[in-house]
Image (cartoon, rainbow, N blue to C red):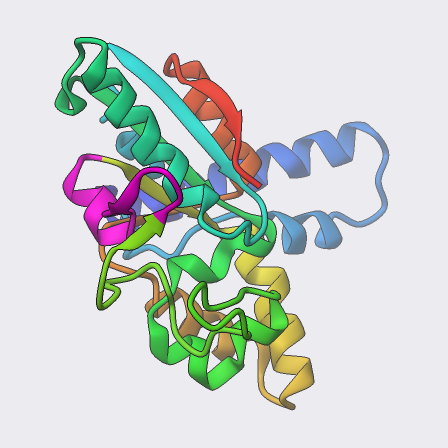
Amino acid sequence: MQTNKSNSSSRRDFLGKIAAGAAALGTVSIAPFEAQAEQFFLPDDHADPEAWFNKIKGKHRIVFDATQPHELMPFAWPKVFLLTNEATGTPGKDCSVVVVLRHDAIPYAFQSDLWEKYKLGELFKAHDPATKQPATFNPFWKPKEDYKIPGVGAVPIAINQLQDNGVMFCVCNMAITVYSAVAADMMKMDAETVKKEWIAGILPNVQLVPSGVWALGRAQEKGCTYCFAG
């Protein structure tokens, strides 16, 4: 994990490069560039995402790109990948699976109290698989019972269960920045306060990353095959 000092140093170095580039282009003011760049930095108390991606070491590697609620798919497919690799001779512990929660799929990275307070099921059109109504809690975090897949039966595909199988989850900071501001505006709240609350409510062992597309690029650089997951 990077220290606050090293994070701050990286921030200054990055902004310095932006400033130099803007000056070279004859830009009158670099303030807008600095303001936008700051949105990409993670809070100092969050783990270094570059180091997190170094955990990808499996024989077979895949990254699932979850951009929106898509029934069970963002969670069923990682389990199917593990099960079918086991069936063909590669234990799950020898595979690396990454799930990138970005765009409209980010609420799955949050604790249930945020779903209730901010009506995330309605905001993101994320339904409770049991009732088919907008979810008032995170349906894929410690559910009361396993979900059933037709033709297969009950399968443990909750985020906590997949994490126990070694599946790595991350969530997009840029999407959190945008949607927390939207929610704040709808509820007449302070955007920065809402963003901090959402980040504080990220589920255990879910990595915050600068952006989902950044994460997809890093995963593929580490040898992961890309799979769209809705």
Q: Quadrant of the C terminus?
A: top right
Q: Quarter-wise, where is residue 185 in the image?
A: bottom right
Residue 162 among magenta residues = yes
Residue 155 appears at what percent x and percent y?
26, 45
Q: Is residue 102 visible?
A: yes
Q: Quarter-wise, where is residue 183 in the image?
A: bottom right
Residue at coordinates 15% horizontally, 43% vertically from top-left? 164
Asked if residue 216 is positioned above or below residue 171 in the image, the reply reads: above
Residue 204 appears at what percent x and percent y?
23, 57
Residue 118 among magenta residues = no
Asked if residue 17 is positioned above or below residue 180 in the image, the reply reads: above
Q: Is residue 164 left or right of residue 27?
A: left
Residue at coordinates 60% horizontally, 75% vertically from top-left? 122
* Relative depth, front residue between 94 and 135: 135
Q: Quadrant of the N terminus?
A: top left
Asked if residue 34 is positioned above or below residue 57 in the image, the reply reads: below
Residue at coordinates 42% horizontally, 68% vertically from top-left? 130
Q: Is residue 54 visible?
A: no
Residue at coordinates 38% horizontally, 12% vertically from top-left? 223
* Relative depth, front residue between 166 and 28: 166
Residue at the extreme bottom: 188
Residue 100 appears at what percent x and percent y?
45, 40
Asked if residue 77 is positioned above or below residue 132 in the image, the reply reads: above
Q: Which residues are magenta?
A: 149-166
